[in-house]
Image (cartoon, grey):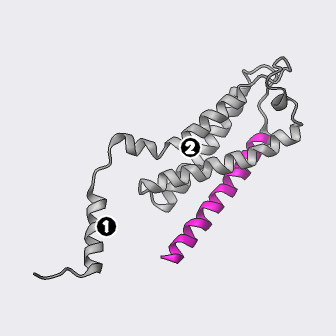
Amino acid sequence: MHEMNPVKKLERVKVHRKNVKISGFSKLSHYLPPLILMALIFVMSSIPMDGKSERLKFMTDLAPTVQNILHIPVFDLLAYLWLRSLAKHGFSRIQKLISTMIITVGYGILDEVHQLFVPGRYASLSDVVMNILGITIGIIIFLQLERRLKLRR
């Protein structure tokens, strides 16, 4: 019996894996990390800053500068998670970047509008700027990691 070349065997496995249909839940599960973070951002920005909640004093007593700076790592992570999720679904590089920018910047703006309706909170252009800075950093980190992984292959 003829033994198949190991390289051709690996190529056949790769082609077979690409042709396997992914279940609906499995497709959705790739989007869970950024969606969970978005829900967490919504919950955190729903906390009234009117000083009435004793249990959340540690959050409400943060200096405004610290609160503004915290937007950077949060939206950095959000952009990174969206890029990773979209990459798993075969989006091209430009599609990933544009989609991530639209989703994350749009969400940041909507979150600021949402805060108009929360006692003691307000919408802030500086928060949107910090969000965009974080998003930019997240995109740069993702692209650097993606490039390094491709160089290793």
Q: Nearer the viewer, residue 111 or 146?
A: 146
Q: Is residue 137 visible?
A: yes
| Span highlighted in magenta in the image | 127-153
Q: Are marks 2 and 1 in contact (CB under 8 Å)?
A: no
Q: CA distance from mark 2 to mark 1?
A: 28 Å
At a point 48% along the width and 52% down the height, the residue shown is 86
Check disc 1 and report the residue beneath it.
14
| Above or below 135: residue 63 | above
The label number, if any, that marks residue 152 in the structure image = none
The image shows residue 32 at horizontal and vertical percentages of 50, 41
Report the side of 85 relative to 114 (left or right).
left
The image shows residue 133 at horizontal and vertical percentages of 73, 52
- The three-letter code of the residue at mark 1 reads Lys
Q: Nearer the viewer, residue 153 or 67?
A: 153
Report the side of 57 relative to 108 (left or right).
right
| Above or below 21: residue 124 | above
Check disc 2 and report the residue beneath it.
34
At a point 70% along the width and 25% down the height, the residue shown is 46
Report the side of 107 relative to 124 (left or right).
left
Mark 2 or 1: the one toward you = 1
